[in-house]
């Protein structure tokens, strides 16, 4: 996006227990973060997480976002981007006892 002159933003589900963001900016368990190079420091994009330092109300904050909590990435200028599939947690299957009838 930045190569095209656009500003990348991510929408994050903050109900994920490992998300580290300033709590006062969370609205309805969601936060939108600008991840442009000009807005972040030490940006790390890995297969498992996104991490960086950013300034919120003048304070430097370490941000940690597990990849599973990223709901979308889009350009701030036009809203175009990608929505990601939300994975439901696996359902717990109640195991039945392994009984056999004998004659």
Image: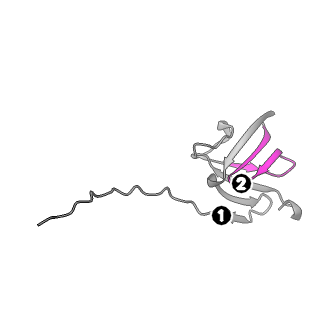
Q: Nearer the viewer, residue 82 or 64?
A: 64
For the N terminus, give its image quadrant: bottom right
Magenta extent: 32-55
Residue at the disc numbered 2: 10
Q: CA distance from mark 1 to mark 2?
A: 10 Å
Q: Nearer the viewer, residue 63 or 99?
A: 99
Q: Nearer the viewer, residue 44 or 13?
A: 44
Assign the magenta stretch its main secondary structure: strand
Q: Quadrant of residue 74?
A: bottom right
25 falls in the magenta region:
no
Residue 5 is at least partly visible in this image: no
Q: Residues within 10 Å of mark 2 (few under 14, many from 20)?
A: many
Residue at the disc numbered 1: 83
What colour-coding does the image apply? one colour
> Which element type, helix, strand or loop, lies under badge 2?
strand
Residue 40 in the image: state x and y as whole percent. 82, 45
In-image side of 54 versus 90 (left or right): right
Q: Residues within 10 Å of mark 1 (few under 14, many from 20)?
A: few
Q: Quadrant of residue 55?
A: top right
Residue 65 in the image: state x and y as whole percent. 68, 47
For the C terminus, give its image quadrant: bottom left
Residue occupying the far left of the picture: 103
Residue 17 in the image: state x and y as whole percent. 57, 43
Q: Nearer the viewer, residue 57 or 100?
A: 100
In-image side of 89 versus 67 (left or right): left
Residue 66 in the image: state x and y as whole percent. 65, 49
> Which element type, helix, strand or loop, lies under badge 1?
strand
Residue occupying the far top of the picture: 59
């Amino acid at each position: 996006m930045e190569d095209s002159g656009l500003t990348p933003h991510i929408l994050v589900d903050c109900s994920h227990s490992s998300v580290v963001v300033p709590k006062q900016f969370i609205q309805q368990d969601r936060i939108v973060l600008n991840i442009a190079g000009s807005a972040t420091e030490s940006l790390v994009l890995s297969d498992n997480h996104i991490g960086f330092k950013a300034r919120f109300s003048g304070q430097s904050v370490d941000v940690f976002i597990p990849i599973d909590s990223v709901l979308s990435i889009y350009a701030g200028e036009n809203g175009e981007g990608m929505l990601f599939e939300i994975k439901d947690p696996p359902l717990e299957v109640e195991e039945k006892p392994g009984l056999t009838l004998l004659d």
